Amino acid sequence: MSDPLFNFLMRLRTWIAGSALVGLCLIFSPGLPLAAEISRVSHMAEHPTSSEGRAAAFRLEAQLDKAIAESEAWKQIVRQPNGQLHHQYLIPGAGYYQLFDWDTYFMGVALSYRHRGRSLEGSVEDFLHFTDHYFSYVGYTPREVDGHHMWALPEMCKPFLAQMALRASLTMHHVAWLRPYYHRLADTIRYWRNARRATDGLFTWFDGVESGTDNSPAVIYAPADCTEGVDLACYIYREYLAMADLDIMLRKPADVKRYERHAAKLKKLIQTRLWDADAGTFYNRNSRTGKFIKVPEWTNLTPLWAGVATRRQAHILITRWVLNPHRFWTRFGIRSLTPASPSYHPIHGYWQGPIWIISNYMVMHGLMNYGYTSQARLLARETVRMLLRDIKKTGGMHETYNPDTGVGQNEGNFKSWDLLGAYMIREAYNGTDAAAIPATGSLRK
């Protein structure tokens, strides 16, 4: 199908979905799953854009915000300097003592709404304390450390450090704190480019634990260091843009252009090398065989969050996979793995089926990025409703949630990115994104 015709049909389908003409909507959606269309139209029928629906949604969010505050969650995620961690830093909850990588970033995003950036800044400083200092490989930074031990060797800190530094600087309205650490931050980018870049220009995870989706069947464990991750490429793309933004703030124009060139090249590689046109989705790739790793997990959706999918790719991915109740979509959010996978275990599967708030958050913004506003708002409302129900019943929030019942599973004293739930509705309804890379330019449009 030609792009003009495809775009026309997409616009037509979106207009029809807003009306009561459900039958016509199904007729004018060639090649897309019937279940996904029915699900999409039923969601639109809730009229989430009405003033009454908006007010109810914001009341729901206010209740969750109050419940989180009363649980003292904001205090429990901040730890004071401890041993080899020389600065105030963030932890995923009261039961933790380690500094983790991507958890820290998303907690910093949530804290930005409370105008608190010092603990995120301190976390970046603590991570970079180990860069180029204790280990021989330039740029290597452990993904997890505590006050007295090294953890997770040889796994690398996920590429969120530049995004952390940018979010901390924006929250505190200054970037001077970063100058003594800038060289080490740049070295973390060099590590990925020098040690983890495959011959085709994409990047590899060492193993599933390093990726954060610990037991994901989409990341090959043996041999290690051969999975070109869709999510990894998207995170590094955002790191490039975050470094460019920091360089704007630090007045380093040559570095701005260099990082934006890296980002543009990587964006094209994601669109071409990691897109399976037949399946209509992104997949991880085996760097040694060149073949797709055809595991339908939620990280395949990260190009929507990062804004690197083309408009056509996004529409196909969203309608075939995201909104399809037989694949990722559930009443409570996004499954971490689709039911068709032989590894699917919705109760005890950890990253093999249960819902995570981080994937709900990313997919919500992915839907917003490509014009699926009503579905993004529905996802935000149901996520907030699920978290509020959990905290009222158990006194806390959980690490994962059952995709069939919405009941909390795994760690029950979890904070981390669950705290984003307190702001998802306002972001979905106001079109804002505290995790956005804000500088304007052709790559951000």
Image: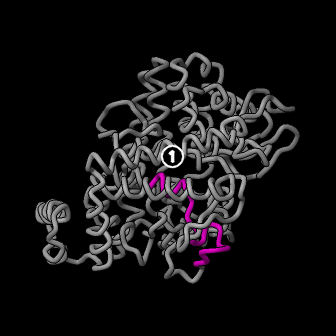
Q: Which residues are magenta?
A: 344-363
Instruction: Name the residue located 55 percent from the left edge and 35 percent from the top edge.
Output: 162
- Residue 364: x and y in percent read 41, 53
Instruction: Name the residue located 63 percent from the left edge and 53 percent from the top edge.
Output: 391
Q: Within the magenta stretch, is there residue 359? A: yes
Judge from the rendering whether residue 272 lies leftward or rightward of residue 6; answer left or right: right
- Of 41 and 250, the residue lying toward us: 41
Q: Is residue 305 above or below residue 132?
A: below
Q: Within the magenta stretch, is there residue 295? A: no
Q: Give the mark count.
A: 1
Judge from the rendering whether residue 359 lies leftward or rightward of residue 136; answer left or right: left
- Where does label 1 land, which residue? 236
Kind of element beneath mark 1: helix
Q: Quadrant of residue 161?
A: top right
- Kind of residue at disc 1: Ile
Which quadrant holds the C terminus? top left
- Of 300 and 397, the residue lying toward us: 397
Instruction: Name the residue located 16 percent from the left edge and 71 percent from the top edge.
Output: 1
Q: Quadrant of residue 349?
A: bottom right
- Residue 433: x and y in percent read 41, 40
